[in-house]
Image (cartoon, grey):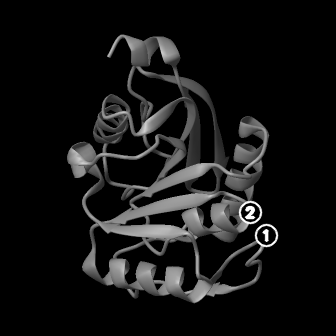
Amino acid sequence: MTRIVAGEWGSRRLAVPRSGVRPTSERVREAVCNRLEHLSGGLTGVRVLDIFAGSGAVGLELLSRGAATAVLVERDRTAVQVLRDNVAKLQANATVLASDAAKLTDRSWPEPFDIVFADPPYDMTMTHIAAVFATLIQGAAIAVDGLVVAETAKRATGQPWPAAVDPLDSRDYGDTRIWYGRVSSVAVDNT
């Protein structure tokens, strides 16, 4: 069972696809939300992009804690339907996009996102993850000084950041590593 940990929808259950996704654990979501709240000075009013969203647990958790809006991106058809059902059940201010996160280059965003969270499959290479973030930065999807977070396997080597991201830190939770970074205004200006 997956549920929202805290905030407006605390303890509400979320549906999870039967296969093909690995929901971020409650413990990790709690830690991520607390860290993001600290790094951003508060979650109230922030715009969130959750790529490789799966059940939407992270994006919906951030909305429950005060984020203004979220876009949840998932390519798996079954997961997309589960996402839509979770958003409808919570009446969340979220948009579900049925798309591959690596193909968001053609998207035009009305405003850049303050927080971008990526939970790609654990077998995805760091180079590929960095390329996805680079594409979003080049497409002005992430605000200057916006926070970026990547969830990877602890055993993964390298870093998930392109040159336009200043690494902040990483934290381990069991077999999971959470990476935090901030989009650099200097790097964005040079893109």
Total marks drawn?
Answer: 2
Residue 151 visible: no
Q: What is the secondary structure assignment of the residue under circle 2?
A: loop
Picture quadrant where residue 98 is located: bottom left
Question: What residue occupies the far front of the structure in this picture?
Answer: 110
| Marker disc for residue 7 | 1
Quarter the N terminus occupies: bottom right
Q: How would you rate the neighbour count of disc 1 (Cα within 10 Å): few for under 14, some for 14-19, many for 20 or more?
A: few
| Marker disc for residue 33 | none
Mark with earlier residue (2, 1): 1
Question: Residue at horizontal 70%, vertical 45%?
Answer: 36
Given contact means CB atoms under 8 Å apart, are the residues at marks 2 and 1 in contact? yes
Judged left or right of residue 12, residue 183 is: left
Where residue 142 sits in the image (x, y, percent)?
Answer: 46, 37
Question: Residue at horizontal 56%, vertical 63%?
Answer: 59
Q: How would you rate the neighbour count of disc 2 (Cα within 10 Å): few for under 14, some for 14-19, many for 20 or more?
A: many
Question: Residue at horizontal 26%, vertical 63%?
Answer: 99
Label 2 to label 1: alpha-carbon separation = 5 Å
Where residue 29 sits in the image (x, y, percent)?
Answer: 66, 61
Q: What is the secondary structure assignment of the residue under circle 1?
A: loop
Of 57 and 123, the residue lying toward us: 57
Where residue 81 sits in the image (x, y, percent)?
Answer: 36, 84
Where residue 173 sits in the image (x, y, percent)?
Answer: 66, 54
Query: Mark 1 belongs to which amino acid?
Result: Gly
| Marker disc for residue 65 | 2
Picture quadrant where residue 156 is located: top left
Judged left or right of residue 124, residue 14 is: right
Residue 107 visible: yes
Q: Vertically, is 97 above or below 117?
A: below
